[in-house]
Image: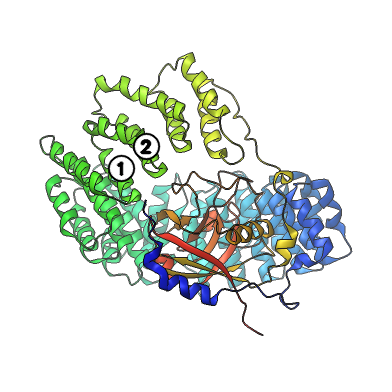
Amino acid sequence: MPNRSFRYWPLLLLAAACARTPRASTDLANKYHDATMRQIGTAQDERNTPALLPFLSSSSPTYRREAALAFASVQAPAAVPGLLPLLRDADPTVRRAAAYALGQIGDSTAVDTLRVRVLKENDPVVRRYVHEALGRTVTRRSLPELWRVETLNDTARTAALAWGLSRAALRGLASPESIRRIVAVLNSPKLPARGRLAAVVGLSRTRGYDTDLQRLAGATLVRVAQKDRSYAVRAAAAATLGRIVALSSAAPAGGAATPAPAAVSPATVLVRLATKDADYRVRLSAIRALPFGPETYADSRKAVFTALNRDQSAVALTAAEWLLAHAKGENGAALAALADGNKQASPRVRAALLQAAVRHASPAARPSLVETLQKRFDAATDVYERSFLLQAMSEAPAAFDFVRIQAFAPHQVPVVAGGATAALLTMRRNADFPTAKQVDFAAAMRQALFEGDVAQLGTAAEAYADPKLFPEPQPADLAALRQAQAKLRLPREIEAWQGLQQALDKLEKKAQPTPSPVATAAQHPIDWAVVQAVPVGQQVRLVTSKGIILLELKPNEAPGAVASFVALLNEHFYDNLYFHRVVPNFVAQGGDPRGDGNGSAPYNLRSEFGDLRYQEGSVGLASAGKDTESCQFFITHTPTPHLDGRYPIFAQVVGGMDVVHKLDIGDQILGVELVVLPSL
């Protein structure tokens, strides 16, 4: 791809004028200037439980707290007996840290002690942490322990209960009674926004009880989706209403569940939210949830086309994806014309519309659409646009030969090579895939193993693990998988290693998955000199092709991640990289040297789960599982509680959040610089 940085030289000059060497301040010094803190931090990074345990009984409440927080990242069950007494510690910050760590460990042996502590804890903040920990440790049998005590006359206790119920639901633990309790919490007066969000997220993540959800929560969700002051609450309520509407649409005549009475139907509410809500994230969530049954399709379609023609790119993309998934009776040529007619649409939106056009076109019209896609591909100069077009071609098995050529063209860029190989797999799973081409597909997957590109390896591994595609893999196939895996560079290519190993485990019918070879702290220890040079409040200027984003680093909560990020930005590692993944109303992700999500720095980090929660603008490290973080980072568009304690947070957006919401795949990172802290 041509270098596009010269277009943005005014932004670069602005960044350079504002960037300076960070200035130390004794008032802003992070906690790792204390040698004991560094000792605890090193033991955490090394996953050294024996070295940490003595600090839980330290005479210093500071060190007791820090040791407890360390176990939130180590997550060693052996620490539970030492953490439980700290729930009664005289210092509330120690009790809070102990509860957080116990929740992160998730050991059910802590349930009885946590249940008692919920009743006795007087500090409202600590009580919320204890209730969250209870939600993270209860089993299906002990789920009722979450609501043993009535709390609806105490706002703080009600909010704490909301978080406990939500954390259990995020783990897949729910029941009709838990739904009833969440609804009661959501209807309680004066519940703060965070408590309401916890309750609605709990409902949105409840699985296997859709009929009860409709019966017990329908009317409340209709009210909340329309009237709640928080966009995040309205968006989560809209997503959950989509499941209720889908349940009604799927029910046979005379067999539909009877929902609680509501002044307006959930389908009508979703259409209204999709076109009229003030926040694009709510409109987007409502479009994703729009029903598509015969009785509701016309109204949903109208809302979708309104979004395509009038709304911003993220909402228009969601509308195009709705058409791709749910369109009925649409004309493929008309959808293609819509892609051509909307000159303001992004390449990603246009490609999604073309993909919908191919999927829903008549057999007679499809060849012409495929030809159009191929011409657009040849004319496109942006590798991400080419990848979008290849994804659109995945709907047409007739494009197999064209896509295969792109997958293995000499010197092909990773974004295109990986996108083409993924498109081949999608084609093969198409019911119309010609039998005569199945041999060619198998040859393409073998070639992917031989070529050794990590993205193509992942796709090939997925294909070989699918018994519908390879019902009887040959010994030569297993040997090829092992040979490809042996050539990978660890820990840099750990994700490709995992994909190949999962395929081998499945093909060899192993009873237990093979553990990943996770890198240890000795491979890349925390550079404490770098950490100590980063004061609390240190800001970073992230200059992108859409504008400037200001981040505030979190050295106290994620010293290893901050040290790595600072070292990489000082090396200009991130300059001219791209945002390769953007999921509207979820995350914008970048920092991959390959540009396709499969790249890494030469090392992995150990996961640091500090006492932070994912809010709008939280900056986390991407990973392929615990202790596999590296250089890729993501920024959240909205609160995402299901990521809490699973992906490390190392920074927070403090300026330019409007730029984050504008980012799309292919937008460039022009530079990343540390900036001077304002004088006190």
Residue 672: x and y, percent? Answer: 53, 64
Residue 57 in sight: yes
The residue carrying mark 1 is 391
Residue toward you, 555 or 178: 555
Residue 183 in sight: no
Residue 102: x and y, percent? Answer: 70, 53
At x 65% / y 39%, what residue is drawn?
518
Residue 333 placement, left or right of 90: left
Quarter of the rendering occupied by the C terminus: bottom right
Amino acid type, residue under disc 2 in the picture = Ala
The residue carrying mark 2 is 422
**Could you say which quadrant of the image residue 150 lies in?**
bottom right
Amino acid type, residue under disc 1 in the picture = Gln
At x 52% / y 62%, what residue is drawn?
198
Q: Residue furthest bottom?
A: 680
Residue toward you, 89 or 534: 534
Q: Residue furthest top?
A: 475
Helix, strand or loop at label 1? It is helix
Q: Within 10 Å of the Cα at label 2, are there few (<14), some (14-19), or many (20+) other Cα atoms?
A: many
Q: Residue furthest left?
A: 364
* Whether label 1 touches label 2, CB < 8 Å: yes
